[in-house]
Amino acid sequence: MKVWNPLPPDRYRSLESNLTDTKPLIIDTEANPQDILECAVQRLRASSDLLKTLYCLSFKQADVEDIPHITHALYLLTQDGCDLLQVAQQQMLGWKAPA
């Protein structure tokens, strides 16, 4: 289980789903929190839809290679969505309402 770590002080945060040394996919932690949240919702909704498809799929209809492909896509979408939610949450905790 991952331990909650506050965001690093730098502006760009790499996605956990990056599997390379250079971490080319990043989140701009200074982006509008509403935009970050919308990106998270979009990925988690796509993940949910894909999971529903997997649930409804008959294994007799599916190719043996389909399941790993679907689960890999589910992992990427869900992990990226969670990373985005974490950044949005961090921003909103420090957010102050306009006077």
Image (cartoon, rainbow, N blue to C red):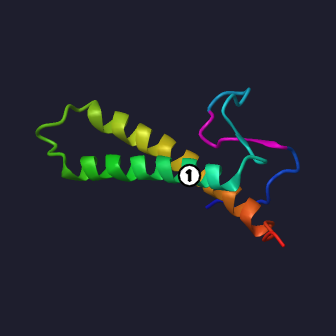
Q: Is residue 66 visible?
A: yes
Residue range of the region highlighted in magenta in the rendering: 11-18
The kind of secondary structure element at disc 1 is helix
Q: Please report the residue visible at 24 percent of the width from the left and 53 percent of the height from the top.
A: 55
**Closer to the camera in the image, 21 or 56:** 56
Task: State which quarter of the image contains the N terminus.
Answer: bottom right
**Closer to the camera in the image, 38 or 99:** 99
> Of all residues shown, which one is farthest toward the right?
9
Q: Is residue 62 left or right of residue 37?
A: left
Establish if 99 lies above or below 55. Answer: below
Q: Position of residue 94 (x, y in %)?
A: 81, 66
Q: Would you name the residue on which mark 1 appears?
A: 38
Establish if 92 lies above or below 16. Answer: below
Establish if 39 lies above or below 67. Answer: below
Q: Is residue 16 magenta?
A: yes
Q: Position of residue 64 (x, y in %)?
A: 23, 32
Q: Position of residue 59 (x, y in %)?
A: 16, 43
Report the label total.
Answer: 1
Q: Please report the residue visible at 71 percent of the width from the left and 31 percent of the height from the top.
A: 23
> Of all residues shown, which one is farthest toward the front?
99
Q: What's the amino acid at mark 1? A: Glu
Q: Please report the residue visible at 26 percent of the width from the left and 47 percent of the height from the top.
A: 54
Q: Is residue 40 left or right of residue 36?
A: left
Q: Please report the residue visible at 28 percent of the width from the left and 53 percent of the height from the top.
A: 52
